[in-house]
Amino acid sequence: MQTVKFGLVDGQKVTLDLPETLEEVLFRRQVSFEMEYEKARLFISDKVKTHTLAENRTQYLKYLCSAISEFFEIDLNTIFKIDIKNSLDIDGELEISILNKHIKDLAEGELDDMLDQIDGSLMNLYSYIVRLTNDYKPVTPRTNEDFIFNYKGEDFIIPHTIRNLYNGKKVLTPVSVQQAVETSQIRMYLNRQFDKKKDENKTADDHQQDANFRLTAALNEISLMALKRGEQLPLDDNELDNFIAERTEYFFDIDSKTTLDILFFSIFLWHN
Amino acid sequence: MAQLNNNPEYNYFFNPPTSTGTNDSERDMISRMKAENLKIFKRVGHRSIYTRLLELNCFNGLAATPLQSVKVANFEEAVKILSFKNAGA
């Protein structure tokens, strides 16, 4: 974790703890950030399509500030107060050359170089977070190995579902009907949510709902699949709902790297 | 899932045999049943597997009640049984 300082227009400074790896990013912050990032991306894409980016370029900063505010869970007004006069032209509009460089950085920038370039610039900070949150490198699970992760001092296990028998036959380890059905159910709800509207027709509320669904679905799925050693899911529906609700809250501070590893492992299980 | 799908024993779970009926009234009935099944799936989703397995009574005794028994049953066993059932066994 690094500390970066930004000057505010009132002469004060705001200090942000900047993660350097996905282990240091809370998954819930990543989901909130990505929701705002998506809005910013759609804004730019719409203005490029209608050839109106130049006259609307300063509005882009609003999306950028919202995304940064979500990522650091800091009041939006504080982010709005960050001094960006070096990025503005004489009319107080966002400098076009800076916007062009920023868009290029978003597409091509290298994470390691970007960390050194933040240097008090809001746009460089944003580019860095985009690259960091996209920096996940999945590790292919080894055959026959369970996925074990430690969270708040406790080990949680997701069993590897496929085992090779000595005669070469592949069998599934005990995934219960309940685990399979409830996990599939969560994915069905999530897909229904995302399929409700096409991306370009989504409102800010729709994006907010998508982000909430994505976070809740991921945490619910982890609650169902990742159990402590010897633990079983409650069989009563109400007790199961309570169990999932409690575990979802418990996993609220889980980091992005662990979450993405779990989801990747889980996808690997269901698609192999 | 793909692993299960590749196992020929479970073929009829993933690809239930389809019948188009031999006359107009059969075709009409099959199409209405398909529409009804789709409605049920939209209402309860994958949980409809519970009721199908309950009707078969094949996991009774694994837990305190028939529904709990279905829930604790091995998913692969359930897929196998539903595949046989879909095949007409």
Image (cartoon, coloured by chain):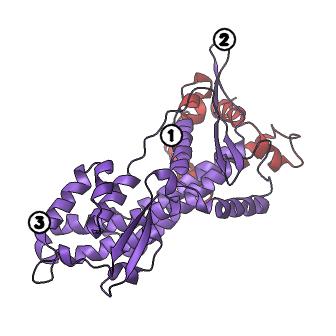
Chain colours: A purple, B red
The numbered mark, 3 or 2, whose residue comes first in the sequence reads 3
Q: Could you tell me the amino acid type at mark 1?
A: Asn
Residue depicted at 17% across the width and 69% down the height: A47
* Mark sitting on residue B23: 1
Q: Is residue A25 visible?
A: yes
**On screen, B66 above or below B83?**
below
Q: Is residue B85 above or below residue A171?
A: below
The residue lying toward the viewer, choosing from A102 and A7, is A7
Please name the amino acid that badge 3 sits on: Ser
Please say if A262 is above or below B22. Answer: below
Q: What is the distance, in whole Å, between disc 3 and disc 1 at their CAs?
A: 72 Å
Question: Quadrant location of residue A203?
Answer: bottom left
Disc 3 crowd rating (10 Å Cα; few below 14, some 14-19, many 20+) is few
Chain bearing tag 2 is A
Question: Dot 3 lies on which element?
Answer: helix
Provide the residue designation for mark 2. A167
Position of A203 with respect to A267 (left or right) is left
Residue A97: mark: 3
Q: Nearer the viewer, mark 3 or mark 1?
A: 3
Q: Are discs 3 and 2 both within one chain?
A: yes
Instruction: Tell me the subunit letter for badge 3.
Output: A
Residue B2, given in percent of the width and then of the height, sits at 53, 32
Q: Residues within 10 Å of mark 1 (few under 14, many from 20)?
A: few
Viewer can see residue B46: no
